[in-house]
Image: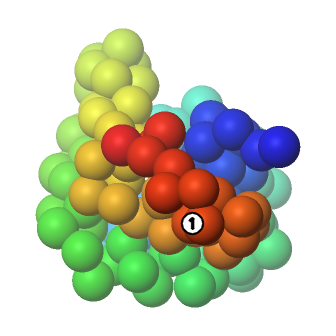
Amino acid sequence: MRPPCEIIVAKALPAIRTVLVRDLVDRHDLSQKQAAERLGVTQAAVSQYLSSIRGDEKLEKKLEKLEIFSEIQSLSDKVATEGSDKSQIISDICDICDLIRKEGTLCKIHFDEVPSLSEEKCEVCL
């Protein structure tokens, strides 16, 4: 059985990072190296997010259509600012994950991964 936190780590977090990295590079004109340094990841990871090697394209497109996108853009604004508060960035990422849970996106992903949950009327994600 896959708990919701496993789905967050495997699918949601990489999708959030992909959307965030794309916004940092496209809207804030950061280089891959700058984005990597600000996020505390390697430049190779940023490259993989941009080329869709990491993440879930279907979920990324969903995130860009939901209100969560504005939260990711707000986070991008903070990350783009030099000397931004790292602990606040971590907190904001956690808040975005909470939104994914509360608005039901995580449940939809979870039901796709474990179809028997919809039959049981599971509400763990919520």
Amino acid type of the residue that numbered disc 1 sits on in the rendered structure: Ser
Q: Is residue 36 visible?
A: no
Relative placement, left or right, of 114 versus 126 is right
In depth, the one of 67 and 86 nearer the eye is 67
For residue 6, which quarter of the picture?
Answer: top right
Tell me the residue at 26%/58% (across/down). 103
- Density class for disc 1 (Cα within 10 Å; few <14, some 14-19, many ≥20) is some
Q: Is residue 92 above or below residue 42?
A: above
Tag count: 1
Which SS class for mark 1? helix
Q: Quadrant of residue 96?
A: top left
- Placement of the N terminus among the 4 image quadrants: top right
The answer to which of 88 and 59 lies nearer the viewer is 59
* Residue positioned 20% across, 54% down in the render: 71
Horizontal and vertical percent position of residue 108: 50, 69
Q: Position of residue 100 (x, y in %)?
A: 36, 53
Residue 110 sits in which quadrant?
bottom right
Q: Residue at x 33, y 23 (%)?
A: 91
Residue for badge 1:
118
